[in-house]
Amino acid sequence: MTIRNSNNYKELLSQFGNYMQSKGLSRLLLIVGLYTLYQSLFKVGVEEMLIYGMLPLAVFSMVLFLINPRQSYYVLFVIQFLLLIASSMTDVKLGIATLLLAIGIIAFQIAYAIYQKADWSILRNGMIYIFLVWGVFCLFELTNSNHVQAAWNISITHYLVYPIVCAILVPIAVRDIKGIQWLLIIWSLFVIYATLKGYWQKNHGFNSRELYFLYVLGGAKTHLIWSGIRYFSCFSDAANYGVHMAMAFTTFGLAAFFTRPIRLKIYFVFIALAALYSMGISGTRAAVAVPIGGLGLFILLSRNHKMTLMGVIALLSLFVFFRFTTIGEGNQYVRKMRSAFNPTEDASYQLRVYNREQMKLLMEHKPFGYGQGLSKGERFMPKEQMPYPPDSWLVAVWVENGIVGFSIYLLTHIVLFGWCAWILLFKVRNRRLRGLLASWLCMAAGFYVSAYANDVMQYPNSIVVYTAFALCFAGQKIDQRERVEQMLAEKQQKWIETT
């Protein structure tokens, strides 16, 4: 080979290497991935194919986590949705998988922070202090005479682990407005999937796994009812599906007012409408409480007279539509939602009232409850068990923790909401940032209103709700950084103009 040919060969090799580094490798992986999915479609079926299809995203998330541990919360946020989708297709211990992931990420984050000698002051926020106090009571419940360790291990994830995880990881990962918008974009992808899955169930029917849930496990009793079929998408049940989509509708609907650029604003409106559709086909009456509760808090938090007026009009219009009109009565989902505004005429509501009256008599002798995780604890075979099923999350908290624990739990969240509202009203000056944070907090308020009517503290609701609180505490630091950057930019501009 001549010197000239050798140089040409090296040049071509160098060009090929640069191409592979920039675009070629990604395109090659895409082709291989598509071919693998095509082959798996015929060998293992659609559901298994979708699981394989999610693997690259999971791998990418873990690589992102290892490369930049500061972004570990985004990894947790992504994978919790992927695990929920996977659990709808195959047997996944969702609670254990999510718990182990959360604990692993926290441990890695702490080790990384120690190694980097990071500034721990960002973790000194009110949310951690509040839940450490509540955590003392959770540990005290270990001494409950009716305690079952396995049940406590499961319930402690929603009671304490996820709030602490969010309080630690969110301020580290989310450091600007773009970070908040990225959380919304990640969530929006899951909302789209859940909406399409619900649409498929409605128009093409249920698959074998969903039929097993309905007709073997007894789901048909609550999903095939007088008002029609209640669809549940990839969620555990229609109530969880409906409330989660109502949370998305509230968050994205409000966030759209404070989002830039315009294309992202339009996208969030689209996601809100998709979530509204899902909320409707779920046939979940408790879901209506989420936007109502969210709008109520938004009116209190809004420092803009125009936005306040719009919120009041929207809230009154929603109430009048369902309570005093018969518009849309021919639609089974509207009719189902409207029944929530006339509860005294509903037989299930009357049964709930009766059950709660009977519960009061039993709970008089249980100031510390039946034990955490035992409100529906038949499978744990405790010494004593509440004979009446709790019909909502807040009732379950009361049954499990008694009036003492229930009061502490309520006080914990009242202080949490009050503290977050104080931050938004008096500490965050950036209007756009305040609006985005308010959209999350209003969603959390609506969630807890619905939690009085239904047991909705399930996956993935708990992490999303406590993300809302953690974002508010992180928002104060974000606002300070935004002001410093703006001040530096103004000084630089003045210096350029003077020189």
Image: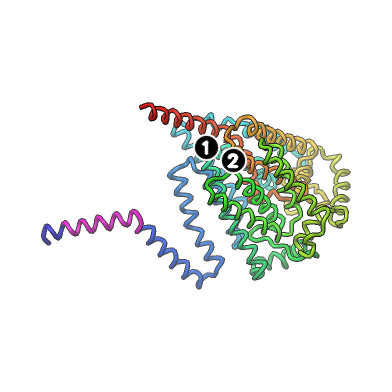
Decide if residue 73 is on the left or right side of residue 452: left
Q: Which percent across, then down, holds residue 269?
A: 61, 52
136 lies left or right of 56: right
Q: Residue at x 58, y 39 (%)?
A: 432
Q: Which residues are magenta?
A: 7-24
Mark 2 residue crowding within 10 angstroms, few (<14) / some (14–19) / many (20+): many
Residue situated in front as seen by the camera: 3 or 457: 3
Q: Earlier in the sequence, mark 2 or mark 1?
A: 2
Residue type pointed to by label 2: Cys
The three-letter amino acid code for the residue at tag 1 is Ile
Front-lying residue, 372 or 457: 457
Tag of residue 166 = 2
Extreme residue toward the front, this view: 498
**As drawn, which residue projects farthest toward the bottom?**
42
The foreground one among 219 and 27 is 27
**Callout 2: SS:** helix
> Toward which corner of the image does residue 15 lie, by quadrant?
bottom left
Magenta span contains residue 16: yes
| Secondary structure type for disc 1 | helix
The color scheme shown is: rainbow
Q: Identify which residue is drawn at 48% across, 32% down.
A: 486
Residues under labels 2 and 1: Cα distance? 10 Å
Q: Is residue 287 magenta?
A: no
Image quadrant where one finds the C terminus: top left
Residue 317 visible, this angle:
yes
Pick the front one: 463 or 246 = 246
Instruction: From the top left corner, tell me how far across and down residue 441 is, in percent.
Output: 65, 41
How far across and how far down the image is residue 39, in percent? 46, 70
Give the labeled residue for mark 1.
Answer: 172
Q: Name the residue rendered at 51%, 59% in the picture.
A: 54
Q: Quadrant of the N terminus?
A: bottom left
